[in-house]
Image (cartoon, rainbow, N blue to C red):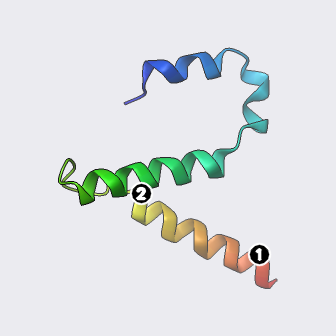
Amino acid sequence: MARLELLASMEDVNKIGRYNWGGAAFATMYRSMTDMSRGVAKNFGGLLFVWEGVTKIVSYFHNS
């Protein structure tokens, strides 16, 4: 589910490639961890799986 306040960031789709997607993913993951630690959320929302995949990909290219 997308938040309405993020809709303005999609106004110019030509700029999407310049967005800080890593920062956005990290912020989302951090918010999910905060919600879990406070008992607001019951699961991590699949973000742990994504994070593990990203770290493996980055490690692969860093070691190449």
Categorize mark 1 by other alpha carbons within 10 Å: few (<14), some (14-19), many (20+): few
Residue at the farthest bottom position: 63
Q: Earlier in the sequence, mark 2 or mark 1?
A: 2
Total marks drawn? 2
Residue at 69% from the left image edge and 71% from the top image edge: 58
What amino acid is labelled 2 in the image?
Leu
Residue at 70% from the left image edge and 44% from the top image edge: 20
Residue at 68% from the left image edge and 78% from the top image edge: 59
Query: In this figure, which residue is indicated by the disc labeled 2?
Result: 47
Query: In this figure, which residue is indicated by the disc labeled 1?
Result: 61
> Circle 1 — which element?
helix
Front position in the image: 20 or 31: 31
Looking at the picture, does residue 24 appear above or below residue 15?
below
Categorize mark 2 by other alpha carbons within 10 Å: few (<14), some (14-19), many (20+): some
What amino acid is labelled 1 in the image?
Phe
**Image coords of residue 43 (percent x, y):** 24, 57
Residue 4 visible, this orientation: yes
**Image coords of residue 51 (percent x, y):** 50, 64
**On-image quarter of the N terminus:** top left
Label 2 and label 1: CA atoms lie apart by 21 Å
Looking at the picture, does residue 12 appear above or below residue 57?
above
